[in-house]
Image (cartoon, helix red, strand yellow):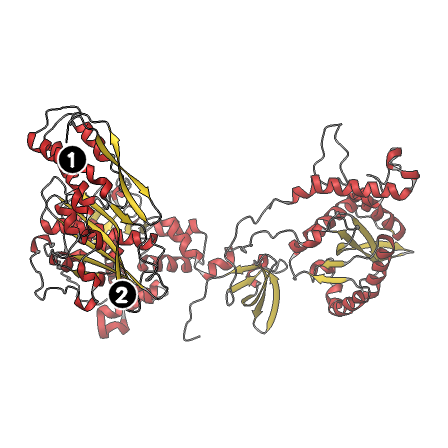
């Protein structure tokens, strides 16, 4: 090439069905390292069709780096400079290279055509790489092969054996196969990888752990990316990847060849493809790991029982003593038990601290990475046990076992049985009490954690200490979100009392019945003369006449609905079915919460507390007439309906907070006169417009200021594992001591609207209880004994 002629770069030109390689003009500069890199980097070839040509330049650059030249040094070695000028002179033939864009002709582009991916790998002392082809065969047996892509690498500067280079080439082929399998949208029925190295084929069919690190890691990656059965042998003559490693002139790439069209045998039936040589390759002993012989010598002639098969340390100790003394096991002495305990402790330490025992028996300190390093351990030669050295050696008032306790691993079965035995002997005390008792003889690593873990799996400990696992707080029910509905559309009811009233010269009982609007928080109080069905229905009729008929009524069962009185316990069974029938006639839906679940009705339970507090501060313990009691309860009703909903601002400019009375009475407080509104809000001074304005104001302020405060979950903010069928649980009963709480098994669960289980049915002997999850304590499964 004339030194004055510009150098050539590479770009693509796309026609409808052909890719053309086009040269672009680059300014010709003196051949320095910088300019050589500039020309080489200008070759844009994402498919890798020019890899046999560009690999020659990459090898030249690698050789130039060995000469220790600067970037702009013009004095390059003559032989390498001559080779570079020859390579650069071939760039003028770039315009003669073209490549078909379509992988297959329209005649073979059918749904029943069979497509296969073939990847060929090869390596030389200078470079290695792989090339991929797509083979398409139709039902008639016609075959077309298309070039897909190729990639190459320059061989490392450090000298490597040919089998290792061939293995690196096979790895590039496996990576290329993985990439094309993911990126090609065409369905592939088969992937075949070819190599001309029998050594590599033998390695791929072997276990990677048998070889050294370099070979083993690459074999493992190849086996992970490809199926070892998809690798086949190809001769060097038929391997197109051989053009990649040897290099080709650019003129040779302009004609049809095995590089552009694939090897000729791919056009034939697969029965005529190359076969693997019959003689297996065994010349790779230098790459195999050296065999290591591991011998273990055991001096224990006694077979100890498996600690995992026992539920208590005493039973394990007894069985060990019987194994030691054989037929004499029927008359065991205390010495026999002591000997058995020592053997169990030695076995536990040998299982978990073998390296520490090895160091201490030879007079060496334990390693700094050991778990026992901070304990300054020492070896008791008389008992063959590791003990804590510690800092209490000079204390002569304590026993030797307390100063130097035996070290144990917390997860060993013998240690867990020791903790369980001590827990049972001490009648299941607290974790600190049990931990302190164990420390008198044993030093258990992470002992507190081990003790707490064991007590969590102990049924007796859980009976006395476990708490119910509440699910995540539920979303607000629909009854709490009846927006733009009249007050008391969804109503919760609850009884409270009894209260004493004076009738003549005698005292009689009266009960209060609370009606709570679950949306607007308004309340209504009625007085019951008795707790039968008729008294309740008459109070309901009075409520409906004054406040309107509710669409649904919610209440508790059992103690909450009984209002704390023992008498209702006897009448509730008769009250329940007849009450539902009466309410059905009024088209009122009546819904009961599960028994013993006051938090299901927390909205009205809180109002009961407020009513009782107001009664206590108003009447105290005095007995008044019924008329006075009714007056006081109605005044309390007015006070509670005057409570503001939501945040009360201290800014005078802010509007007054809304209260339930604003919707019920048209004013914030029953003691205040009727509010006077502007004339613009009173069309013709009609009272219905005033009521409408008040209602609209209530709901506007309700939605804007009060409703967002209900978003947060004040407690039970985390999800817990749902209770399962068959789980053993203990039912919380506040009226009984904990020791008398019944224990049963879950028979049925009741999911809530959000899918979380919030109540369940428990079988206790011959009875069935429905209780909320907040009243159920899960217990560990009791181990079966004697087949029961």
Is residue 382 shown to the viewer in this render? no
Query: Badge 2: few (under 14), some or many (20 or more) residues near its Cα, within 10 Å?
Result: some
Residue 185, percent from left and from top: 36, 55
Element on which disc 1 rests: helix
Compared to residue 661, the image places residue 182 above or below, namely: below
Taking the spot 13% from the left edge, 24% from the top edge, the residue there is 74
Q: Which residue is mark 2?
A: 142
Taking the spot 81% from the left edge, 67% from the top edge, the residue there is 585
Element on which disc 2 rests: loop
Q: Is residue 143 left or right of residue 747?
A: left
Looking at the image, which is closer to me, 749 or 224?
A: 224
**Tag shown at residue 593:** none
Query: Badge 1: few (under 14), some or many (20 or more) residues near its Cα, within 10 Å?
Result: some
Residue 668, percent from left and from top: 81, 39
Compared to residue 471, the image places residue 38 above or below, namely: above
Location of residue 479 by image quarter:
bottom right
Looking at the image, which is closer to me, 36 or 616?
A: 36
Query: Which quarter shows the N terminus?
Result: top left
Q: Which residue is mark 1?
A: 89
Residue 702, percent from left and from top: 73, 42
């Amino acid at each position: 090439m004339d030194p004055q002629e510009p150098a050539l770069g590479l770009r693509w030109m796309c026609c409808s069905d052909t890719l053309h390689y086009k040269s672009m003009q680059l300014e010709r500069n003196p051949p320095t390292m910088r300019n050589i890199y500039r020309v080489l980097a200008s070759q844009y070839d994402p498919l890798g069709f020019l890899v046999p040509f560009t690999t020659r330049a990459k090898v030249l650059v690698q050789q130039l780096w060995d000469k220790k030249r600067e970037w702009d040094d013009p004095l390059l070695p003559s032989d390498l400079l001559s080779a570079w000028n020859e390579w650069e002179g071939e760039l003028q033939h770039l315009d003669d290279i073209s490549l078909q864009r379509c992988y297959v002709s329209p005649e073979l582009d059918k749904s029943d055509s069979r497509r296969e991916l073939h990847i060929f790998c090869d390596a030389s002392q200078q470079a290695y790489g792989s090339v991929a082809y797509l083979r398409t065969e139709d039902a008639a047996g016609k075959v077309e092969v298309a070039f897909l892509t190729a990639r190459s690498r320059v061989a490392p500067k450090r000298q490597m054996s040919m089998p290792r280079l061939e293995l690196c080439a096979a790895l590039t082929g496996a990576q290329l196969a993985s990439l094309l399998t993911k990126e090609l949208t065409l369905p592939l029925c088969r992937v075949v990888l070819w190599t001309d190295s029998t050594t590599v084929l033998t390695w791929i069919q072997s276990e990677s752990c048998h070889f050294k690190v370099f070979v083993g890691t690459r074999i493992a990656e190849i086996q992970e990316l490809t199926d070892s059965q998809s690798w086949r042998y190809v001769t060097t003559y038929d391997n197109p990847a051989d053009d990649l490693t040897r290099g080709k002139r650019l003129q040779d790439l302009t004609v049809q060849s095995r590089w552009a069209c694939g090897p000729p045998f791919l056009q034939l039936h697969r029965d005529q493809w190359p076969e693997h040589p019959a003689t297996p390759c065994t010349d790779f002993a230098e790459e195999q790991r050296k065999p290591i012989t591991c011998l273990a010598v055991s001096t224990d002639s006694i077979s100890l029982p498996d600690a995992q098969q026992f539920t208590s340390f005493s039973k394990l100790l007894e069985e060990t003593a019987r194994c030691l003394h054989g037929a004499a096991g029927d008359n065991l002495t205390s010495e026999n038990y002591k000997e058995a305990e020592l053997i169990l402790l030695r076995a536990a330490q040998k299982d978990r601290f073998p390296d520490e025992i090895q160091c201490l028996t030879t007079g060496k300190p334990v390693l700094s990475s050991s778990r026992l390093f901070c304990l300054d351990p020492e070896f008791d030669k008389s008992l063959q046990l590791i003990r804590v050295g510690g800092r209490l050696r000079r204390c002569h008032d304590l026993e030797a076992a307390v100063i130097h306790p035996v070290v144990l691993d917390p997860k060993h079965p013998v240690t867990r049985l020791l903790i369980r035995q001590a827990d049972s002997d001490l009648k299941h005390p607290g974790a600190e009490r049990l931990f302190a008792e164990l420390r008198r003889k044993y030093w258990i690593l992470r002992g507190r954690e081990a003790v707490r873990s064991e007590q969590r799996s102990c049924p007796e400990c859980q009976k006395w200490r476990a708490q119910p696992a509440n699910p995540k707080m539920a979303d607000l029910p629909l009854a709490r979100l009846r927006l733009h509905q009249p007050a008391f559309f969804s109503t919760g009811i609850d009884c409270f009392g009894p209260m004493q009233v004076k009738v003549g010269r005698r005292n009689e009982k009266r009960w209060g019945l609370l009606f709570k609007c679950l949306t607007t928080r308004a309340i209504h109080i009625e007085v019951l003369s008795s707790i039968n069905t008729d008294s309740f229905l008459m109070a309901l009729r009075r409520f409906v006449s004054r406040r309107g008929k509710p669409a649904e009524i919610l209440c508790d069962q059992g103690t909450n609905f009984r209002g704390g009185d023992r008498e209702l316990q006897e009448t509730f069974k008769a009250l329940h079915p007849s009450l539902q029938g009466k309410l059905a006639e009024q088209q009122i839906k009546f819904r009961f919460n599960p028994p013993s679940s006051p938090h299901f009705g927390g909205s009205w339970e809180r109002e009961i507390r407020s009513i009782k507090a107001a009664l206590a501060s108003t009447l105290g313990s005095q007995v008044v007439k019924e008329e006075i009691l009714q007056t006081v309860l109605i005044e309390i009703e007015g006070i509670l309906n005057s409570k503001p909903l939501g945040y009360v601002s201290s800014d005078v400019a802010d509007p007054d907070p809304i209260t339930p009375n604003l919707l019920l009475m048209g004013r914030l407080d029953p003691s205040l006169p009727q509010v006077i509104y502007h004339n613009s809000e009173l069309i013709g001074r009609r009272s219905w417009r005033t009521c409408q304005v008040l209602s609209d104001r209530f709901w506007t302020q309700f939605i804007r200021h009060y409703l967002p405060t209900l978003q947060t979950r004040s407690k039970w903010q985390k999800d817990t594992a749902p209770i399962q069928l068959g789980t053993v649980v203990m039912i919380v009963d506040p009226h009984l001591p904990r020791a008398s709480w019944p224990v049963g098994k879950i028979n049925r669960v009741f999911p809530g609207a959000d899918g979380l289980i919030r109540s369940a049915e428990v079988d206790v002997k011959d009875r069935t209880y429905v209780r909320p999850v907040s009243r159920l304590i899960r217990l560990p499964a009791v181990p079966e004994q004697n087949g029961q």
